[in-house]
Amino acid sequence: MARLRSGRARPGAGFGRRLILGALRREFNRSPMPHSFLRRALAAATLGLLGACASPPPPPCPETVCPVCPVCPSCPKCPEVAPPPPPPPAAVPDTGRLRATGFGALPGFDADRLLEALPALQQSCTRLGEVPNWASFCTGLRALGEATDEASLRAYLTASLQPWQVINADGSDSGMVTGYYEPLIRGRLARDAQARWPIHGVPDDLVSVELAGVYPDLAKFRLRGRLEGSRLKPYWTRGEIARLGADLPAPVLLWAEDPIELFFLQVQGSGRVALPDGRHVRIGYADQNGHPYVSIGRWLIEQGEMTLSEASMDGIKGWAAAHPERLGELLSANPSYVFFRQLPAGDGGPIGALGVPLTDGRSIAVDPRTVPLGAPVFIDTTEPNSPRPLRRLVAAQDTGGAIKGGVRADFFWGFGPEAGRRAGRMRQDGRLWVLLPVGHRPDQAAP
């Protein structure tokens, strides 16, 4: 076989097979072994040789070294989870509803001296006159003039307005009516040994965010805070503002002589500061630190320091005078803090949230989420600490940090000590009816 790989021409495959078979037959004929065994051996050898000689083996392939790929660990298949639903829109607190009724449902309306309410209604119309739903009513009210009489004014109001009773979110129709006034406190233009408590203007770092651009349903809400880097943090509480002292980045308009009197001026939202030279400086609400109002009277009750009947403004002032060491603790129980602005001097009432002067006994503060600012409102309540009815037409011209909810009002008593005494004692039950132009259905209308 080796010679077949020489340089001569290679014989055909048939010649090789014949040569091998001939040699095997000759060996078979000479062998003394049994023919059956030899036949099997001959057959096996023949097949093996024929297979080996059929074609030369191919040249060996060069060995290729392949890199071994690392085996990646297999993670268990995560179960399929449906994507989370989109967050629901921010909930808007249900502060109350308005239910249509008639003037016959207003107790004492026929006995009210409506001409006393005319100045307050005229003040409201300086703001409402450009509002489409109110323009016609205000035009007619101006046409009546100052010389109108009781009967003409009553006829105009009953023909032009529709009463809507205010209903609370829980379906009840009564709520709390408190009182407020324009206080007079003593103070100075500069700090001295007597006047040590600052009356702050709006701080430079107070951030106020209108939510209407983000959540239209929250158009009547405002977010307040301060920036730390790029994050909005809650603004300082009353206690923190007191500890910051001069480090608070806010102008000081005046200095008060009595911290408890300054506290109640903040609760009222506006007032006058009597200077040593006899002048009065009028200040009004400018902004607030964003924290909710907490009643310090309620805090004293919860501390077991007084009963509900004792928790009047005079009672709280008396407790503060008897416990000067706890004054800071008492005031800090209310985290809300009001910042002021100086107002022009004048004999009119303080400027309310509507932007018009308040009228003694004919203006109230309301929650504007239910009662539209500027609207006439008929109130049915009682005198402070008395069952004697107090039923009259007023105008919704102000708001307040503690005035939240449907049937909730703060009755403006006016300026001075007597107004302060009445306001401090008033915590009565009452009902409200909003008077809206005929044909106008408010968003808060009950279904």
Image (cartoon, helix red, strand yellow):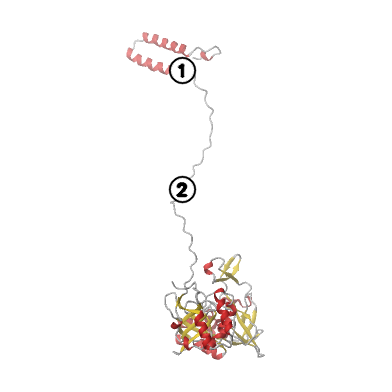
In the rendered image, residue 25, in percent from the top left (x then y), is placed at 39, 10
- Residue 433: x %, y % from top left: 47, 80
Relative horizontal placement of residue 367, taking residue 202 as reference (left or right): left
**Residue 321 shows in the view:** no
- Residue type, label 1: Ala
Q: In terms of depth relative to the viewer, which is nearer, 413 or 274?
A: 413
Query: Is residue 421 among what the camera can see?
Result: yes
345 to the left or right of 156: right
Along the viewing direction, whichever of 11 and 104 lies nearer the viewer: 104
Q: Amino acid at mark 2?
A: Cys
Q: Earlier in the sequence, mark 2 or mark 1?
A: 1
Give the image quarter of residue 107: bottom left
For the point 48% across and 59% down, the residue is 86
With respect to residue 66, does 420 lie above or below? below
SS for tag 2? loop
Q: Position of residue 419 (x, y in %)?
A: 54, 89
Marks 2/1 in contact by CB < 8 Å: the verdict is: no
Going 32% across and 14% down the picture, which residue do you hit?
Answer: 36
Q: How many marks?
A: 2
Neighbour tally class for label 1: few under 14, some 14-19, many 20 plus, Cα within 10 Å: few
Q: Name the residue beneath numbered marker 1.
A: 54
Task: Tell me if mark 2 has few (under 14), some (14-19) or many (20+) residues whose alpha carbon lies within 10 angstroms of its own.
Answer: few
Place of residue 111 in the rendered image (x, y in percent of width and height, measured from the top left): 47, 89
Disc 1 on helix, strand or loop? loop
The residue where tag 2 is placed is 75
The part of the image, by quadrant, that contains residue 29 is: top left
